[in-house]
Image (spheres, rainbow, N blue to C red):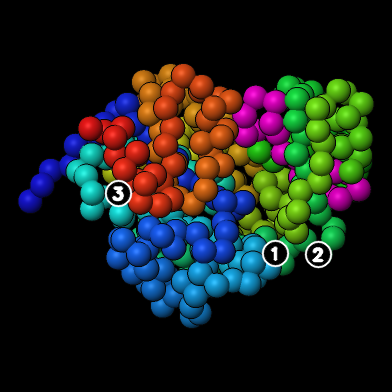
Amino acid sequence: MSTNLVDDGLAFIFPGQGSQSVGMLSELAKVHAEVESTFQAASGVLGYDLWDLVRSGPEERLNLTRFTQPAMLAADVAVWRVWTKQTSVRPGWMAGHSLGEYAALVCSGALIFEDALRLVAERGRLMQDTVPPDTGAMAAILGLSDSQVVDVCSRASTEAEVVAPANFNAPGQIVIAGHKPAVVRGIELGKAEGAKRAVLLPVSVPSHCPLMMSAAEKFREILTGTAVETPQIAVLHNVDVASHPAPEVIRAVLEKQLHSPVRWADSILFMSQQGVSRFVECGPGRVLSGLNKRIVSECRTEAIFDSNSLVKALELVQ
């Protein structure tokens, strides 16, 4: 029986919503059986053919939050399972962007995959149902500082309509979320402040903002009934840029994550300060790799999404 080797200079980061695409991981699945078997296990829990949806679409269905969340969780976990078959090296740290945090918790041993699927399916449903269509919105603000965006959101909010920072993704790359009229005001104020770009995003759910408070309260009951273990690999959480061994604290930060901003740039910087010099984006696409170039350009990041990228990522530990 082989012993796993922990590499403290290596971190795995797991993408969330926005990295999904029809046909994702299809080439990797032809070479590595773990991909399709992971999706088949997910389908058994969800009651519909998730692999067929990912392979064939339609795109509009895959992009609905309640389908995107289980699909991305399964994709991230599938890539991790491929990695663990190829090498005994394990990272010293893990983190996931928003939804990706659930994949990090599964891969660290804190959550059972099937339980995490039920959690994210319910999370997606609650998020979709909490805010009526066309009531909420999200926008990307590029070229302003964190404090400028905080100030813009404060000025754009009213008692009845709020907007708040949702994702601190990278320096000068922040997403805001809230009531649509407040978000539109935020865009205009951001432009007036000198933003390079300020644009509405094509999403139906205003994530990580106060509009998700009621969803978080309902989600608490589901979290309470879910088994959580101490992670075997440290997971850095979006909400407070900290790792937590206690299951009850993990539940609390997952609840809070629904209505609090994702502190992604701070998370990557923190891991870099702990000695991490190599990152693996574990899941479809290269969204997080792109952000890393802006946050820690001196660090090497490789994304795993097909056979060739897997070979490049494995070079990080050879």
Residue 83 has which mark? Answer: 3
Label 2 sits on what residue type? Pro
Res. 114 image quadrant: bottom left
Density class for disc 3 (Cα within 10 Å; few <14, some 14-19, many ≥20) is some
Cα distance between the residues tagged 2 and 3: 40 Å
Q: Residue 202 versus residue 286: which sits nearer the camera? A: 286
- Residue at 23%, 39% (x, y): give it: 89
Question: On the rendered structure, is 84 left or right of 216?
Answer: left
Above or below for 310 versus 66: above
- How many numbered tags mark residues here? 3
Label 1 sits on what residue type? Gln
Residue 128 has which mark? Answer: 1
Residue 230 % position (x, y): 33, 46
Residue 62 % position (x, y): 61, 67
Residue 132 has which mark? Answer: 2
Mark 1 or mark 3, whichever is nearer to me: 3
User: Does dot 3 land on a helix, a strand or a loop?
Assistant: helix
Residue 82 % position (x, y): 30, 54
Query: Do the CB atoms of the residues marked 1 and 3 lie less than 8 Å apart?
Result: no
Q: Earlier in the sequence, mark 1 or mark 3?
A: 3
Above or below for 32 versus 191: below
Residue 78 located within the stretch drawn in magenta: no
- Residue at 62%, 34% (x, y): give it: 169
Which segment is the magenta one? Answer: 168-183
Q: Which quarter of the rendered picture does the C terminus lie within?
A: top left
- Residue at 29%, 39% (x, y): give it: 314
Residue 174 located within the stretch drawn in magenta: yes
Density class for disc 1 (Cα within 10 Å; few <14, some 14-19, many ≥20) is many
Q: Can residue 4 be seen in this view?
A: yes
